[in-house]
């Protein structure tokens, strides 16, 4: 899964040099987000090694362009139907926190990648697939596709596929196993504990450094 999120992050952070696009289009929205984030990082590169500030940047500038409710619903699958409103809210909250945590962890994994948006295929007026390729400094070329949906007149991503591996599908299996063993509340507890433990580890590392 780290490769999926690393690829996702690379798209979100490294698409400089592309033609100007309108934010009303799915690929244009990616462009606008990337340029804004790149400008912030270029102005203060120390943010990359400052976990709290990095997390705040990801949370504020990148994740608002994801439809976490739809993403969580697709990942949880059939059990979502019987989940209470409180359980659904908790699942979305912990899933979102997990993505913030993963983003900050892989932020500096791939320095100076080259990203090219190949196409934005409109499936209908409200759904699209944005296809891109990423060239990493070690010579690898990674295909990353965004599945996007227009929600309240804004385009938002609800799945990302890296080298043919869907993020939603990948997590769906582990979530299903967890729900089968300990139920939805058990899954929420597991996600919450992992997010808390990761936060404590990051805080300890910062204090030690």
Image (tube, grey):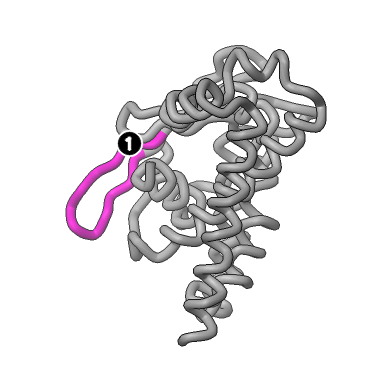
Q: Where is residue 166 in the image (x, y as percent from the top left)?
A: 42, 28
Residue at the far front in the pictured view: 182
Give the image quarter of residue 158.
top right
Q: Where is residue 21 in the image (x, y as percent from the top left)?
A: 59, 42
Give the image quarter of residue 131.
top left
Vertical position of residue 153 compared to residue 19: above or below = above
Q: What residue lies at 51% left-to-right and 25% top-to-bottom?
A: 181
Element under label 1? strand
Q: What residue lies at 42% left-to-right and 52% top-to-bottom?
A: 10
Q: Which of 161 and 39 is in front in this view?
A: 161
Q: Where is residue 79 in the image (x, y as percent from the top left)?
A: 63, 17
Stretch in magenta: 133-144
Q: Residues within 10 Å of mark 1 (few under 14, many from 20)?
A: some
Residue at the far left in the pictured view: 139
Q: Where is residue 38 in the image (x, y as percent from the top left)?
A: 54, 64
Quadrant position of the N terminus in the picture: top left
Q: Is residue 117 visible?
A: yes
Q: Name the residue under label 1.
A: 143
């Amino acid at each position: 899964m780290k490769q999926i999120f690393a690829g996702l992050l690379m798209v979100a952070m490294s698409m400089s040099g592309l033609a100007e696009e309108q934010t009303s289009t799915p690929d244009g929205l990616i462009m606008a987000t990337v340029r804004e984030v790149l400008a912030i990082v270029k102005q203060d590169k120390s943010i990359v090694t400052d976990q709290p500030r990095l997390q705040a940047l990801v949370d504020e500038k990148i994740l608002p362009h994801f439809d976490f409710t739809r993403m969580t619903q697709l990942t949880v699958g059939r059990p979502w139907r019987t989940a209470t409103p409180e359980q659904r809210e908790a699942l979305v909250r912990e899933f979102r926190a997990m993505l913030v945590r993963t983003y900050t962890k892989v932020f500096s994994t791939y320095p100076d990648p080259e990203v090219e948006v190949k196409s934005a295929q409109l499936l209908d007026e409200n759904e699209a697939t944005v296809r891109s390729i990423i060239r990493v400094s070690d010579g690898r070329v990674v295909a990353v596709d965004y599945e996007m949906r227009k929600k309240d007149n804004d385009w938002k991503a609800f799945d990302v596929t890296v080298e043919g591996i869907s993020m939603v599908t990948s997590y769906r299996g582990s979530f299903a196993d967890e729900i089968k063993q300990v139920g939805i509340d058990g899954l929420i507890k597991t996600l919450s504990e992992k997010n808390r433990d990761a936060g404590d580890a990051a805080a300890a590392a910062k204090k030690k450094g």
